Amino acid sequence: MQRRIAHLDMDAFYASVELLRYPELRGLPVVIGGRHQEQIQSEDAHDFPRLRDYVGRGVVTTATYEARAFGVHSGMGVMKAARLTPEAILLPPDFEQYRQYSRRFKRAVADIAPTIEDRGIDEIYIDLTDVQGDTAELAQRIKDHVRQATELSCSIGIAPSKLLAKLASELQKPDGLTVLSLADVPTQIWPLPARAINGIGPKASAKLEALGIRTIGDLAHADPAMLVATFGQHYGAWLTDAAHGRDDRQVVTVREPKSMSCETTFEQDLHPRHDRAALSQILLELCQRVSNALTRKGYLGKTIGVKLRYEDFRTVTRDITLAQSTADAETIRNAARTCLKRVALDRKLRLLGVRVSSLTRSMQISNNRGS
């Protein structure tokens, strides 16, 4: 039996949740992100904060499709977004609310198809191979069930592989439903830019461009030996397979994290010597947040690392491996300080981050699961 793998992606998820709270903003360019001192109080669209008035280093978390039409996208600096659409409304993110809606839509999907791979707060893979029903009708049932549970729309792509399903889910956004077979790859997938494939990042995309490979079709027709010679055996062979839609990865229902981290970009550059007190407090808070995440999810970590970005955007990382795994905030902070001693602290910083890796399950969680 041919596999039926679905990729479900909530449409402009954070922004859509906010529009449930502020329905008067529907149809307007709205950006979620930045750093806000207080929550929105007004119910009058004319009184909402505008991008033009924002000052700071915040980034765009997401945006409505009306804002995206101006070129605004996730990860963009809010100040840059303000230059593209200064009259757009700016709302603060409410991650607790987004997590609640995330749990709702995933429960709704599980009612119909329980084999789910969680890929984040707003997207999942679903194995529909053994679920009874016509493929398109089944996808529509899932979409309807999600809407009933959340009042939000989603886009679904269904294909024989995870790679194709993810590409398919983007083809008819928002509120899309696309079913692809391998026979559809030349007509619907090959015209897309090569960077549309999940796993082809900016550096690989630029290298492909230099080779004259711009579309997935170009990649499919490229000499496999040339790709291996250029990108290495593993990645070069994967590029050929990906361009043809070949992907044997299974839907993984349980996935262990490799690391947990927290980082923050400062509103203004901070100097390690002149702003030592402020940086010490930020480091303490980051270590506490990572510690809380480890404890909440039942993990210990053995390798502690720091990430610094200087004012010139150069980024450095350092890490240290402890004798014993930990989730203790003070132990993490002491290790992070040791890492910082191996970094040049003679220039202003714009970002600081703390990361804990080499994770293992804590005994308490493991014992509870076994009881």
Image: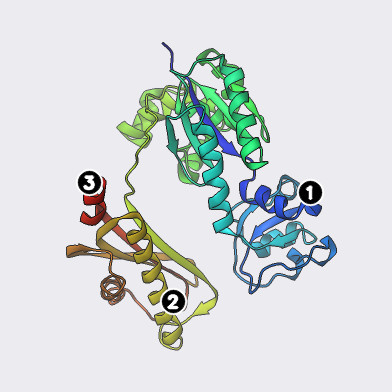
Q: Seen in the image, is 125 located left or right of residue 43?
A: left
Location of residue 346 with respect to 300 vertically, above or below: below
Per the image, label 3 sits on a secondary structure element best described as loop
Q: Amino acid at mark 2?
A: Ile
Residue at 76% over, 47% down? 66
Per the image, label 2 sits on a secondary structure element best described as helix
The residue indicated by pointer 3 is 371
Discs 3/2, front = 3
Quarter of the picture containing the N terminus is top left
The residue indicated by pointer 2 is 282
Discs 1/3, front = 3
Residue at 27% over, 76% down? 334
Mark with earlier residue (3, 2): 2
Query: In the drawing, what numbered circle is on residue 45?
Result: none
Q: Residues within 10 Å of mark 3 (few under 14, many from 20)?
A: few
368 or 339, nearer to the observer: 368
The residue indicated by pointer 1 is 26
Is residue 278 visible to us here?
Answer: yes
